[in-house]
Image (cartoon, helix red, strand yellow):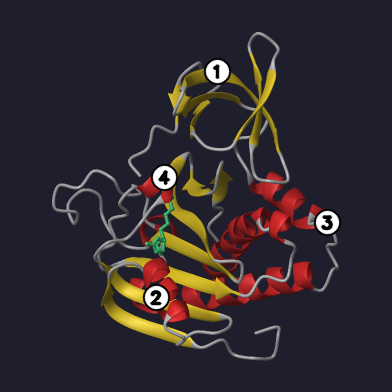
Amino acid sequence: MSSGKENPVYTFSHISSTNDAARRMIRGGEIDGDAVIVADVQTAGKGRKRRDWVSPRGGLWLTRVLLPRLRRDRWPLYSFLAGVAAVRAIKGDTGVDVRLKWPNDLIFRGKKMGGILLETVGEEFVLIGVGINLAVSWPSQLAGSTRFPPVNLCCVSGYPHDEWCDLRAALLSSFNRETDLLHRQTDVNGELVVDCWRRYCETLSCEVLVKTDRGCLRGTALDVDDDGSLVVKRRDGEVISLRAGEVSVAQKGGGIYGQQRQ
Ligand code: BTN
């Protein structure tokens, strides 16, 4: 660990949600600094936009509790950091080239393998929740649920599931490395981390269809703002920033991909 100090790791076989457990433990005074919560199974896992996140055995479900040292308005940088750290850890540990899809999905060849949920607890803590499908086969192990990342890492990498602790360790070191860079002000405005995120992101420069709460729009994904919004140039030339939405990316042949299960 680059900070030289081990963060406490709380491991559960079953828990509602590692993010919710972290929140409870912070409020109850059990956690007062950087920490990690890991579960084999989540019984009430959460995705973005208040969606359920089905979390059976065979996935990596964890929350990194972080004491932020950036100004509040810079906290969206932690989301970029989480995406970059996850991509690098997966590549380093398994050799698989995972990419990012806005806002922060982990994808392999256009299909979702994992996701990241950033939450805050008051003004003091950031919770980075990461869910990765390691070895769950869709749909046979999901008892009818259709909301699950269809790609599993073991399948595409040949990575043995019984060694999943290595990936967990790689992910946590990767978080620590990227966080140190940001906190030590090496990356004063977060430019490095946002640039890395852009490099790993498959959404930018593409024709996209974005479903928002107010309807669908088509256009070209130009960039991301510092606050994580997607900047899209609509077909009529208007440039708009979207804070939330579901993106599908147009393929060269004209089709759209990205209407994924989770
Ligand atoms: C998404 O919607 O893509 C984000 C999914 C994030 C899931 C992870 S699993 C660990 C942590 N605990 C949760 O309840 N959610 C996050």
Please state, as top left, top right, bottom left or bottom right, where the N terminus lies in the image.
Answer: bottom right
- Label 2 CB-ligand 1 distance < 8 A: no
Ligand 1 image-quadrant field: bottom left
Return the disc, 1 or 3, that comes first in the chain's sequence. 3
**Front label number (1 vs 3):** 3
Query: Which residue is denoted by mark 2 in the rendering?
Result: 24
Read off the residue under disc 3: 189
Q: Which mark is residue 49?
A: 4
Name the spot of residue 249 as percent of width and height, x first: 52, 28
Q: Amino acid at mark 3?
A: Asn
In the image, is 47 to the left or to the right of 166? left
Of callouts 1 and 4, which one flags the residue occurring earlier in the amino acid sequence? 4
Mark carried by residue 218: 1
Distance, label 1 to label 4, CA atoms, is 21 Å
- Dot 4 beta carbon under 8 Å from ligand 1: yes
Nearer the viewer's eye, disc 1 or disc 4? 4
x then y, percent, for residue 218: 55, 18
The structure residue drawn at horizontal position 52% and vertical position 19%, both measured from the top left corner, is 217
| Residue occupying the point 61% across, 56% down | 79
